[in-house]
Amino acid sequence: MLSFPRKIPELLATLLLAGSAMADERWAPHAVAGPVDQLSVAGNACGPAALLASLRCGSEKWRGVPERIPGSSDKSKLLYIIRAHGIRPSASLKGRNRWTGAGINAEDLADIAEELAAIGGLPNPKTESILLQKREKPDKLLRRSHDRLRDSLKDGFPPVLSLRRYVWRNGAWQALQGHFVTVVMVPEKLERGASSHEFVYFDPWGGKKVRGSFRIPPLPVLSTDGKTSSCLEAVVPDANIGRSKVRSGERTVVVPTVITGRW
């Protein structure tokens, strides 16, 4: 007759709890591929780096795209994306290229995402603003943004998220700096009445895996009436987006503004 150590039931309970936790989270299909470090090329290459990370962390069909991009390293593939797709005329900002010394905006990055998807004969990624829409309430905005992030992960395309730091200065909200990251985990579901949720993202600044959270701001941010925020807040203490530009005593927040993904 076989005998089992007394700790076996405890081990099984631990494994069951771990399995339950994973079931509550939606991860990128191939998050093990890890982040791409923009600093291997330039400090303003966060957009192409976040997009490359999204492709290689996606489902099998999306992972085929970076395999077709010339180069044997992150650096060489990033340089190819910038030279072949970034240094083209911008469709949203007349008279300038998509990628410049100031980086790239969400619209131009979405155009590059479409061109890279075409390499693999794949459907175009979508782009959506996650600022408050007309007649939309903050809790609905939180749920809409969560649904877009989760559905994109579920579809196999880890979404690229545009973040922007704002500061309250001289009686108005002023944008200081933008940054792109790749979201690789969000909760599978939000509880009823939720006002926040965690997420895991790959930050191309140094190629880091970090946790943050989205929340309905406790105080009005980018408000038109002084009462209701026009956005969500991204609590990302490990990100240094525009920190050096914030003056002592100023109120500052990081705002998620645009998602590029599949849903």
Image: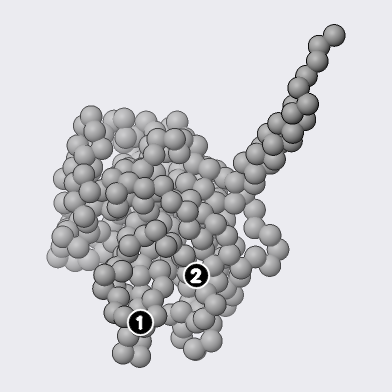
Which residue in the structure is indicated by mark 1?
250
Query: Along the line of sight, which residue is nearer the eye, 193 or 235?
Result: 235
In the displayed structure, would residue 241 be above or below residue 85?
below
**Left or right for 74, reference 233:** left
User: At 64% from the left edge and 53% from the top edge, which residue is drawn?
Assistant: 189
Can residue 213 be seen here?
yes
Task: For marks 1 and 2, give the one nearer the viewer.
Answer: 1
**Residue 66's spot in the image, x, y percent?**
32, 35
Which sits earlier in the primary sequence, circle 1 or circle 2?
2
Query: Please, which colouring scheme is shown?
Result: one colour
Query: Along the line of sight, which residue is nearer the eye, 115 or 64?
Result: 64
Q: Secondary structure at mark 2?
A: loop
Q: Secondary structure at mark 1?
A: loop
Label 2 crowd (10 A; few <14 / some 14-19 / many >=20): many
Mark on residue 232?
2
Query: Along the line of sight, which residue is nearer the eye, 252 or 129?
Result: 252
Tell me the kind of residue under disc 1: Glu
Image quarter of residue 100: bottom left
User: At 51% from the left edge and 54% from the top edge, which residue is drawn?
Assistant: 199
**Residue 202's spot in the image, x, y percent?**
40, 48
